[in-house]
Amino acid sequence: MKIAYLVDTNVLHDWLFSYIPQVKQHDAYFNPKKAARIRDFMENNENPVYIPDLVWSEFLGVTLHKEMDVSASLNELKLHFRLLLGVIQQMELKIHENEHLTLFTTQSEKLGNAPFTDGAELVMDPGLIDENLFAWMKRSGQKKGGKEKLLDGMDAAIVFYLDGLAACHPEYRMMLFTGDFRIVRAFGRIRSHWKRFGFSQNTGAVFSFSEQVRTRTGNHPITLMRTARVNKVGLF
């Protein structure tokens, strides 16, 4: 089956800062090599890559309006804003010029579902967390005082953008490409548990931090690059 991708907000974040890594030089969580891989993934991928309007809007808000540095002058704030905006406009141009990149809405792809309504139903489903998922959450939560996050409202809505897009394109295995390992870890359970509600089974989740791709057959590259090595990504 052919592969297509739907990207999460954190992927766009890394794509942006791959152009200006110096801005993140004091950020311990930023990995310039990973960002470069993300840039290559976005710009040189021969498979379709879809960007939901929800993800693009969240990306703009987080990038331009979250944690704004107001410790200096207004002029410096505006200069930084224009720097980020300039790179974002460059990304927009690449999206419009690249036939493999698609910025879409629920209307443009004629999604038959309601991502926010279905997402709300998903997070309110007490049966979603089974014994296996709970055991993983418990192990992970031990490092955080016994607390763990699974899905927030935005995560759940993105899952149903993926579901709707996969239903519209049954010829593809539609993969969520995300840096949020919780979604990747939980995705198999979401897909199987919500199958009875018609959740698209031609779906999967890929961890964007992965440097290599593995497939169920072990030898089928699902990410085809024109200029780079074939990365391996897990199918879940």
Image: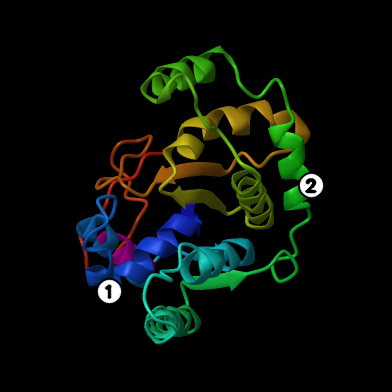
Q: Residue at x 53, y 32 (%)?
A: 149
Q: Residue at x 45, y 68 (%)?
A: 68
Who is closer to the viewer here, 14 or 149? 149
- Residue at the spot of label 2: 117
- Badge 2 element: helix
What amino acid type is highlighted by mark number 2?
Answer: Thr
Q: How would you rate the neighbour count of disc 2 (Cα within 10 Å): few for under 14, some for 14-19, many for 20 or more?
A: few
Who is closer to the viewer here, 138 or 228? 138
| Residue 224 in picture, x, y percent from top left | 32, 60
Q: How would you rate the neighbour count of disc 1 (Cα within 10 Å): few for under 14, some for 14-19, many for 20 or more?
A: some
From this view, report whether residue 108 is shown above or below residue 124: below
Who is closer to the viewer here, 69 or 119? 69
Q: Residue at x 29, y 66 (%)?
A: 40
Relative to 127, 34 lies left or right:
left
The region drawn magenta spans 37-42
Who is closer to the viewer here, 137 or 191? 137
Q: What mark, if any, has residue 202 been given in the picture?
A: none
Residue 1 visible in the picture: no
Residue 127 visible in the picture: yes
- Badge 1 element: loop
- Residue at the spot of label 1: 20
Confirm whether the magenta stretch covers residue 30: no
| Residue 62 in picture, x, y percent from top left | 51, 63
Quadrant assignment, res 227: bottom left
Among numbered discs 1 and 2, the one appearing first in the sequence: 1
Quadrant assignment, res 57: bottom right
Q: Residue at x 47, y 14 (%)?
A: 135
Characterize the magenta stretch by its predominant secondary structure. Answer: helix
- Mark 1 or mark 2: which is in front? 1
| Residue 141 in picture, x, y percent from top left | 44, 22
Total number of numbered discs in the rendering:
2
Relative to 230, 166 lies left or right:
right
